[in-house]
Image (cartoon, grey):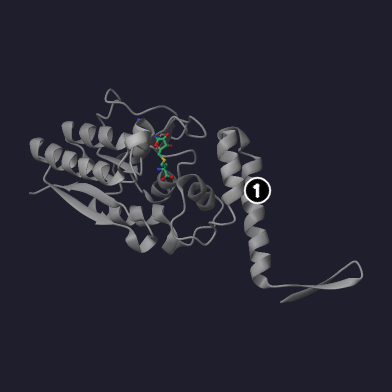
Amino acid sequence: MVEFKLGDEMQKVSYNDIQNIDDDYRVIEFLKSHLSNYTEREMIYIMNNYKLHHHAIFVPDILRQIYDEVGLLADDKNLYLGFMKILEDNFNLDSNIVEIGGGIIPSLAKHIHLKQKNGTITVYDPRLYKNDSSDKKFILKKEKFTENTDIFRTDILVGFMPCQATEILIKTACRNKKDFLVALCEGGHQEFEDFYDDTLWEEQMIDLAKREIAENGMGVLEKTNLESYGDPYPIIYNKRIN
Ligand SMILES: C[S@@+](CC[C@H](N)C(=O)[O-])C[C@H]1O[C@@H](n2cnc3c(N)ncnc32)[C@H](O)[C@@H]1O
């Protein structure tokens, strides 16, 4: 407890309250300087929810990018770090990596860039907060990744819950004989709002990956997860067989 005088009255505030005020301040300061990156609806969502999720286990993407950016995600709750560990355990981080669907703030790519000694990370997302090719090792492409995107120099395609881009990620990687690692989510729901079934979508993506891996000689499909971080969805990748 901290005691201080406000007017004529003594006030008592717990250390937890002080921490929460500081956390809120960091989120608000961030939002003030990034207003143009969010739609009005997203802003309302963020303002209504940012306090609720501080200590939640599974934080929605738009908030978790902000928490990560302002340093509010503990390492053992940080899905981007969990995903990085899977990437490092199964592939060479010092490669030319392309991330599809990096989000508004490219949180995963930022962590990859910080840890890479060699290689590059290029992020594609039309929602990226900026387009920036000035750093040749960390390139932000504010555009959609399509089947025509040049991945000649790419070694690995990754995606952390890239929603409807999951399918194109798997197909493009396998058909170009590139490794891939992708975290599934509830799916590409925007396109089929009325009759959408996320379990069915998940099964379809896994079947697609198995088929593409087999047809293109990319080894076998491996599945893992980040359940200990509160993420209920599978993470899939190809494993080459020597
Ligand atoms: C659920 S968000 C995940 C964002 C980020 N990976 C994260 O977890 O913080 C999915 C993102 O995929 C992007 N996306 C969807 N289709 C895409 C495509 N064809 N190319 C690039 N990005 C795409 C969307 O704009 C959105 O930002």
Quadrant assignment, res 136:
top left
Label 1 residue SS: helix
- Residue type, numbered disc 1: Ile
Spot occupied by residue 57 in the image (x, y as percentages of width and height): 45, 60
Q: Can the viewer see residue 228?
A: yes
Q: Position of residue 153 (x, y in %)?
A: 26, 32
Q: Position of residue 141 (x, y in %)?
A: 42, 30
Nearer-the-camera pick, 164 or 100: 164
* Residue beneath the point at 71% across and 77% down: 1
| 180 to the left or right of 131 | left
- Name the residue carrying label 1: 28
Ligand 1 sits in quadrant: top left
Q: Residue at x 17, y 31 (%)?
A: 175
Q: Residue at x 36, y 44 (%)?
A: 161
How many numbered marks does the figure carry? Answer: 1
Residue at x 53%, y 52% (from the top left corner): 67
View extreme (front): residue = 194
> In this picture, is 53 found above or below 6?
above
**Looking at the image, which residue sits at the far top?**
148
